[in-house]
Amino acid sequence: MPTAADWIQRAREELAQLRIPELRATGILPHGDQFLPVVSYPPITMYPKVDGAELLASEPDPPPQVTAAYVHVPFCARGCSYCHWVKKINPSAGDIDDYIDTVTLEMDLALARLGRASIPVSTCLFGGGTPTLPSPAQLDRLISAFRARFPLDACRQFSFEAEPGNLLGPQGRERLRVLKDHGVQRISMGVQSFDDAILTRMGRTHTARQALDAITAIHDAGIESVSIDLIYGYLGLTVEHWIRTMQIALSSGADAWHLYRLRIKRYGEVQGQVLDEYIEAPEDNPEAERVWLMKMLGQVMSVDHGYDQHFTRIFCRDRSHITEFMWDYCCEVSDVVGTGPSAWSNYHRTFTMNWGSRMDTWRESVHAGRMPVERGIFRDPETEARRSFLLPLKNDRVLKRKFERRTGLNVDAHLGPELARLQGLGLLDQDERAVWLTPRGRFFADETMWQLTQKRWVPFPEIQHPLMPE
Ligand SMILES: C[S@@+](CC[C@H](N)C(=O)[O-])C[C@H]1O[C@@H](n2cnc3c(N)ncnc32)[C@H](O)[C@@H]1O
Ligand code: SF4
């Protein structure tokens, strides 16, 4: 059984192979403790405010025949210190009932706009917020409304995000029964840490023991796949804490985990209170080298135990435990119909983002019969090409013929010099069929993608304050 010291040595050896100082000298790594994840393209905050009706009316392409679906459930029992997601804390039963009525109306609006009575889904995800917070009866009503409009016959995977406390005790068992009866196959649960002191500091409502019990409860309910979210780089989290959390994850019975690096600065409109904590005690924030050590520890401890890496940050026993929703929108670059206050949708080249933190505006729009869209764009061919390249590259690989069929462009002719530069830095590799990230590029996937978000080579300046606005 390797000790913590063995794992640290192993991770340091792997990090040495990435030759980080050499990469740093190119300016590709943000300075200090900045971390700029590239999860969509263009970044969601860069989409202009639009008149939703006008934008949607201008879409020239035919409506999708099959689509991935996302439902945003915007409620949590308590706010976690780091969380940027849109949510209302401690809602009443009436708030949740009203949300279910409104989101059902929004589903009808989305279908009416596409001229369809229903659309079969390829995959679907209910996310949050905490989609397991509603009562069992409310969950039944919400999922029934969804399934009546978005049939699951061709659905490869039905996923639900969850919080451990909601899945325990008689009510928890009842919630799991409802989910199982509706065909939920995968639960993605926020665990964050198996250290109770860190969980308290994060403002989580559960203990490590309860998270473990919830994993068992999900499997006992007959739901095949449990994925857990864990955060590294959290304020005050030591390397030893992280190794302990990974060791517990490995024996927890979870089938997969998503390893998230703490993001302190907001993404979108909501700022977690972790920024205040950072400003008060910046010395608690692990410096970049320590964060990379934790990241590498997560990687080697998972892979050595047979949990393969997918989408750069997900590790699972076998491919059946990946998130098919993410596969569809990142690797297939498929259509997504999103409903709920901060959901986004994509139909062909049109991207729309709902009203986000302004939940009342979302509600008013829907009840007035208007699509509740705040931002969006109709992508021009260059933006479309970059998105069709970046998302599959970061999350899997780009098949050149597929890219060409999708965009009408040749990868080498269109992106040749940019790819050659990144290839020269050992971040990606290619042959006549495909382009993929190397182990170095996968480790620094966000930093590599950052350079592909524009044609120009834009290294980070020598000195950049970590809290500088983006
Ligand atoms: C919408 S949450 C869903 C899970 C569920 N609400 C819960 O927390 O139990 C998705 C995941 O994003 C991750 N996350 C949220 N804010 C983050 C941040 N600031 N930095 C890193 N990861 C974050 C957390 O791991 C969280 O579980
Ligand atoms: S991490 Fe999950 S439970 Fe915590 S506030 Fe965010 S959405 Fe809610």
Image (spheres, rainbow, N blue to C red):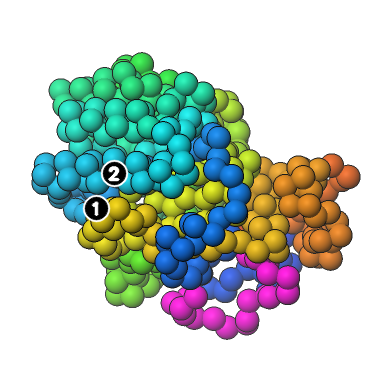
Task: Please name the residue shown 24% across and 58% down the image.
Answer: 364
Q: Is residue 121 above or below residue 229?
A: above
Give the left or right position of residue 29, taking residue 163 as reference: right
| Chain part drawn in magenta | 448-470
Magenta region includes residue 450:
yes
Q: Is residue 123 above or below residue 92?
A: above
Question: Main SS type for the magenta part?
Answer: loop
Magenta region includes residue 384:
no
| Circle 2: element type | helix
Q: In front: 17, or 57?
A: 57
Q: Mark 1 highlights which residue?
A: 367
Q: Mark 2 highlights which residue?
A: 105
Give the left or right position of residue 391, taking residue 363 as reference: right
Give the left or right position of residue 171, taking residue 374 as reference: left
Q: Amino acid at mark 2?
A: Leu
Task: Please name the residue shown 34% across and 60% down the image.
Answer: 355
